[in-house]
Image (cartoon, rainbow, N blue to C red):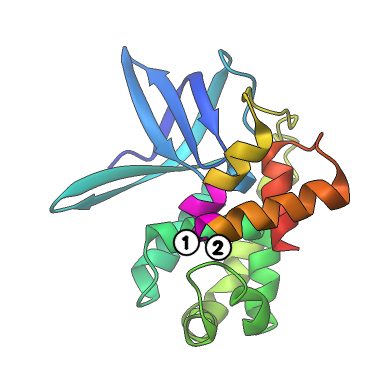
Amino acid sequence: MIVLIEGKLLKATPLSAIVSAGGLGYSVNIPVTTAEKLPQIGENVSLHTHAVYREDSQALYGFWHESDRDFFALVIEKVSGVGPKVAISLMSKLSLESLIDTIRREDSVLLAKTPGIGKKTAERIIIELKDKMIAFQFAAKIENGTGSEAISSPTQHTSTSEDAVLALQALGYKPADAQKAIDKVVHKLGPNLSTEAMIKATFG
């Protein structure tokens, strides 16, 4: 099992990163909350990873913190009906600390706002994970207090709004709904936001 990848960041979008390591280029699926922390293209990066193997595919998922990776693994392994795509969408909407707090407060309404997660799935997440959140809360606080947070910097894109629309589609939005959501954010907050900021603003 690949649990960590370290190397040069070759390319990044709000939901993916390509990392060069050992002469190979690895495509890594990431949540928006990890994309926000990535360094500039060409710099070294370290991601905690979880590999998902299926009969017809294999995919690598990466996270800035080890606790984020472990939470992702817990969700897809313990919650029926929630696969990697929905888990990434969930972790793109909220930081780990916010997710922990939301689950502990049993706020199914907030969880259900995530694309791909309806009311029943949100309630199932709370039932399956609530008792496990204390340990994750402790781990997340330790990692966030180590001073290892990277400086957030916009990745290099030709059009942040176009990338934001594509990212929302990857998270489950219909093309027209994705475009409408980003247009609304741009109108309200201006066009100078990073792609990651635009995506997070749509969840507000």
Q: Residue furthest left?
A: 55
Q: Quadrant of the N terminus?
A: top left
The residue tagged with tag 2: helix, strand or loop?
Answer: helix
Whether residue 87 is situated above or below residue 110 in the rendered picture: above
Who is closer to the viewer here, 115 or 17? 115
Q: Position of residue 99 (x, y in %)?
A: 64, 66
Whether residue 152 is situated above or below residue 15 in the rendered picture: above
Q: At x 56% / y 57%, what residue is drawn?
A: 176
Q: At x 62% / y 25%, what residue is drawn?
A: 157
In the image, 151: left or right of 27?
A: right
Q: Are marks 1 and 2 in contact (CB under 8 Å)?
A: yes
Which residues are the magenta region?
167-175
Q: Position of residue 103 (x, y in %)?
A: 62, 77
Q: Position of residue 132 (x, y in %)?
A: 53, 74
Tag 2 residue? 90
In the image, 120: left or right of 158?
A: left
Name the amino acid type tagged 1.
Ala
Tag 1 residue? 87
Where on the picture, by quarter, is residue 95?
Answer: bottom right
CA–CA distance in space, label 1 to label 2: 5 Å
Who is closer to the viewer here, 154 or 193? 193
The residue tagged with tag 1: helix, strand or loop?
Answer: helix
Q: At x 70% / y 29%, what residue is drawn?
A: 154
Q: Is residue 174 magenta?
A: yes
